[in-house]
Amino acid sequence: MSTVYFTDLTTTPGMGLMKKVEILLKEVGISKIVKKGDLVAIKIHFGEYGNLAYIRPNYVRVVTDMVKKLGGKPFVTDANTLYKGSRSNAVDHLQTATLNGFTSEVIGAPIIIADGLRGSDEVEVEIDGEYVKKAKIGSAIALSDALIVMTHFKGHEQTGFGGTLKNIGMGSAARAGKLEQHSTSKPIVMTENCVACGMCEKYCPTGAVKVSDHAIIDYNACIGCGQCVAMCNYGAMVPEWNASSELLSRKIAEYSKAVLKSKKAIFISFITQVSPDCDCWSINRPPIAPDIGIAASADPVALDQACVDLVINSVGEDPFHKAHPGISWNEQLKHAQKIGLGNRKYELKKVAIFLGKG
């Protein structure tokens, strides 16, 4: 049985939420994963521009300060998105992070976009999973010495909820990895968007793409690597969003396993502003649950399960199923436990009992 540490949002003078985050991280073992000289990736979602439900940058500063006190070298990171938005390349991504309050002055560490300028900087990690053989992980995350995952726990339109596993597996994947998870087929060409710039043809590793008036894909030669999607600035090379929610959830679990392979890691989730949809939307709809608290664990599966349980118990029904009927959030937890990522059985320890030590 795994341990999940939890604090509610009650505060007193001298014991604010930032102090509670510090205590949670001490309890979950930050000193065990950060050693002097370690390059420590702090994985977060910077929020799509226009969305206001993402984690406050103030909390990130607590983590970077703790890492530096332990002798580590923190950097804050996320990978580019597969869809066209305000975070689909490093230039827009960094600008969006700044607009949402994530600057080096505020968070106390540099921001590095994990998969580079166009989402093509990746490291292949072999796991030989049931659905994923070699995961394509953003290089900055794959090459880090330790990983601290900060997650805004919320609903999700494709997986039921978006928690730690989603933040790790989908959020750490390079754009080609995101394509592999979201699609069971190969990219298609939106000819009305194509400007015949030739970038897709130039970077296709198999010569499957040819450009005349617009790009054309030879599907006999295409290997579905996603390089054309990564290199297109115009939304002309796009995936088919045709993976079932169950298959997507299983692939997310297997990508999480790849990210965490031989990696020191701890996880913290903020169960606040529990919006029904992902922070990738440029808006956030009203919350589907009250603000509950903050939880942390060394087991990502136990942490997600605990967050689900806390939300359902607070509402008295399953708000994730209500928001997205027909989507089973259970699938990612079930598969994650099956492949050895963690344990769905957990003990919830309230941090309040440790405040005297703080």
Image (spheres, rainbow, N blue to C red):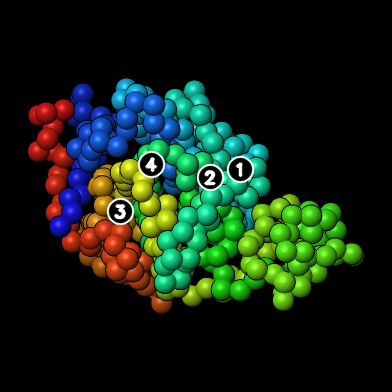
Q: Counting residues from the N terminus, which is met first, the one under dot 2 or under dot 4? A: 2
Residue at which label 1 appears:
116
**Closer to us: mark 2 or mark 3?**
2
**In the image, what residue type sits under mark 4?**
Leu
Q: Counting residues from the N terminus, which is met first, the one under dot 3 or under dot 1? A: 1
**SS of the residue under disc 4:** strand
Label number found at residue 352: none
Q: Counting residues from the N terminus, which is met first, the one under dot 4 or under dot 1? A: 1
Residue at which label 3 appears:
300
**Closer to us: mark 3 or mark 4?**
4
Label number found at residue 139: 2
Corner quadrant of residue 226: bottom right
Which x, y percent locates residue 238?
Answer: 67, 64
**Closer to us: mark 2 or mark 1?**
2
**SS of the residue under disc 3:** helix
**In the image, what residue type sits under mark 3?**
Pro
**SS of the residue under disc 1:** loop
Q: Counting residues from the N terminus, which is met first, the one under dot 3 or under dot 4? A: 4
Crowd tier of the residue under label 3, counting other residues whose Cα lies within 10 Å: few below 14, some 14–19, many 20 or above: many
Rounded to the nearest angstrom, the CA distance separating label 2 from label 1 is: 8 Å
Q: Counting residues from the N terminus, which is met first, the one under dot 2 or under dot 3? A: 2
Crowd tier of the residue under label 1, counting other residues whose Cα lies within 10 Å: few below 14, some 14–19, many 20 or above: some
Report whether residue 324 is seen. Answer: no
Label number found at residue 147: 4
Which x, y percent locates residue 223?
Answer: 65, 68
Corner quadrant of residue 54: top left
